[in-house]
Image (cartoon, helix red, strand yellow):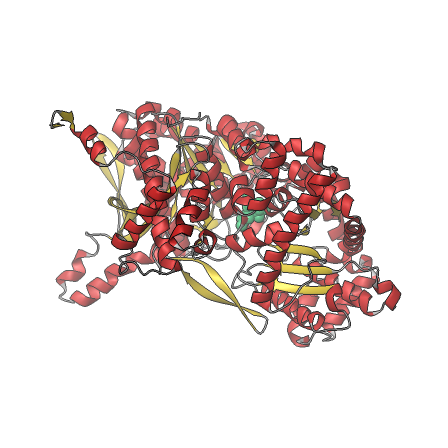
Amino acid sequence: GFVGGKKKTDRMFELMDGFLKNDPVSLQKDILHHVEYTVARSRFSFDDFEAYQALSHSVRDRLIERWHDTQQHFKKKDPKRLYFLSLEFLMGRSLSNSVINLGIRDQCAEALSQLGFEYEVLAEQEGDAALGNGGLARLSACQMDSLATLDYPAWGYGLRYQYGLFRQIILDGFQHEQPDYWLNFGNPWEIERVHVSYPVKFYGTVKEDVVNGKKCKVWIPGETVEAVAYDNPIPGYGTRNTINLRLWAAKPSDGYDIESYNTGDYINAIVNRQKAEIISNVLYPDDRSYQGKELRLKQQYFFVSASLQDIIRRFKDVHGNFDDFPDKVALQLNDTHPSISIAELMRVLLDEEHLGWKKSWNIVKKVFSFTTHTVQPEALEKVPVDLFQNVLPRHLQIIYDINFAFMEELKKKIGQDYARLSRMSIVEEGAVKNIRVANLSIVCSHTVNGVSRAHYELLKTRVFTDFYELWPEKFQYKTNGVTQRRWIVVSNPSLCALISKWLGTESWIRDIDLLARLREYASNSDLQKEWMMVKKINKMRLAEYIETMSGVKVSLDAMFDVQIKRIHEYKRQLLNILGVIHRYDCIKNMEKNEREKVVPRVCIIGGKAPPGYEIAKKIIKLCHAVAETINNDNDVGDLLKLVFIPDYNVSVAELVIPGSDLSQHISTAGHEASGTGSMKFLMNGCLLLATADGSTNEIIEEIGAENMFIFGAKINEVPALREKDSTIKAPVQFVRVVRMVRDGYFGFKDYFKSLCDTVENGKDFYLLGSDFASYLEAQAAADRAYVDKKKWNEMSILCTASSARFSSDRTIEDYAEKTWGIQPCKCPF
Ligand code: GL7
């Protein structure tokens, strides 16, 4: 239509005054506009939190403009799109990341300062979006940032949990969990799409029917829940492209339980209706075992079904039939959690689109790619068949049919090797029949990716050997990476400025390979001086935080030695603590003149234990008990401190990582699929003390073993070591420190008994005893290196300079080219 002789949309755009401007005065106007109309504070008295809200809404407006243009552009170009399906996204804070990616940080800071506010203080007002557990979930967030920055036509899909990962509080040294009701104070970073909603069905029965003269199955579900979309714009850096992370929330469906209304019990009917919301209520807080939980299966199906309905609707808007589906759609399964989408796509194509088995299967096997993130058998999901039958009866049939066809094909290839057939079957026979979700994912995906080279080797030789032998070409790996935007630019502004100064450009923020140019200055004393200053500033920030959180005053001259990650036996925080006890014991037994040579340390540990994981919780308590003894021992003073940082999360990591000198990644070799924390430390010029596990070997290739502290058994040595009785090989120092814990040196003697049992009496599964001596040697080597400040600085610079390969930009480009077959689709500015 036309208005006043102009095209209506042009006239509208004119009325909008064009796009929002990013100069400080325009930003001020917007902030004040949002104070008045969005936050609705009385004119103009507003506090830091309200200023944060108004600023966030102003930033969000800018994100929305770009988001619209990007989606419009994708629509016009209709490229092959990537849909990244993940049950977890650990986004952390959005404000600081958004202003950096939009390139408006300084303008915001200036705008605020004239209004009497400080940008940094406002940024601190934001809580973390913690819709995930650990590395896997943060990886998804880093990858979304890279997808946007590299202009890929991608969408993320997940669940909008009302309760994110629990908050950890420490009482008397024990972990307690508190709900993280993160939406309490509103969430300016999401856009509720009331009109984008889909029904998701559960339970019921399956009937035979005839459609167009053909026999088919009809699922008559027993319950319907509505999935409502919440969009979270993800801005790229240095580009207009802003992609979408669409999270689904469960709402009661209009058609829900109509029967109960007719019984006259209106109140109970409403209460029952409301139960639908439970599905998206809470994130499972254990990062690797949730076997056989009905709610977990419902969560998985809920987000997958809504996402596929959305994806298919978008596809059908443009395409008349499904022939082009595999050329337009790539579906990425982030671990097995979304793998039920395989059966769901098959069901839609068969039962709703009536494409027939052959055609449907041909589409399905071309669109899915699967990335596995684990080597732990207990993390490979299994769903009891009974549970499946009850919740998703039609899907179970489809899985049986897929498995039948697979078994037939397999028999033709390998003959009657029943042991192997039964290992590879999607259905696990036994007292309890299970669906093996990983097997389903491998059979139905065109590509199976590991997350580091070592992980890939383990997949081939230990975890999925049968499948690898059958389909070697399916197996690949894409070593994980992290985004330098969040992990340097946002979290370490001083280092960011220093790097740009020495490289003479900010281009490394998009083009990470440029970082390698820092190598040539690694021994330059001017750079080293500035480098040390930056570290000092960050250590000061961290020291202040430690004092506020734990009351412990730490010396900036000490080496800050950090291990932050989820607490797990395989990650061996216990090894770290036993090492600290050994250090303490040594200092206590030293003569005065020997003590002068000791390199002072602040040992920092942080992380959450899964709520039901007793041993992990005991490790946290032990850390506190040991800290209590050491930190109150004036005789030791600044030579050694041990602090536990409570409630470790993304924003705590942003503070801790830049301020650390040394970081520990000390899992028993063969247990950490990749590890991504090490990459963040590396980028921030923090030296690594690590086992040759996960991605560490690849890091060694980049920086050289001489610039790291590597110790312990190698992946292929571990099985043989386990065969032997590990206590025989445990050195005397190990026996001694465990004995101190056992004998109650740190109190809580009875409580720690079972913890000590995990590493003694031939039960040391994670090989703390046999790795102890080489661990201590690596620690001693770190001490020696720290004394030589020049050398240490050079190594620190080399860490940052060698970190390019561990950017998620590299990971994503690799996936785009080798797995997804997608091309950048850049929205014009
Ligand atoms: C993990 C792996 O344990 C970790 O090594 C890897 O870096 C990460 C991302 O690929 O995935 N797998 C897993 O289940 N969690 C992880 O962090 C929780």
**116 sits left or right of 731 in the view:** left
Could you say which is closer to the camera, residue 683 or residue 332? 683
Residue 110 locus on image (x, y percent): 43, 46
Q: Is residue 411 visible?
A: no
Q: In which quadrant is the N terminus drawn?
A: top left
| Residue pictured at 35% horizontal, 35% vertical | 66
Residue 821 locus on image (x, y percent): 46, 26
The vertical placement of 133 against 141, above or below, is below
Could you say which is closer to the camera, residue 817 or residue 67? 67
Residue 214 locus on image (x, y percent): 24, 30
Q: Is residue 630 visible?
A: yes
Outermost residue to the front? 114
The vertical placement of 783 against 594, above or below, is above
| Residue pictured at 40% horizontal, 26% vertical | 825
Q: In which quadrant is the C terminus drawn?
A: top left
Asked which quadrant contains residue 540, the reply is: bottom right
Could you say which is closer to the camera, residue 434 or residue 715? 715
The vertical placement of 16 against 538, above or below, is above
Number of numbered labels in the structure image: 0
Could you say which is closer to the camera, residue 402 or residue 140? 140
**149 sits left or right of 472 in the view:** left
Residue 15 locus on image (x, y percent): 20, 35
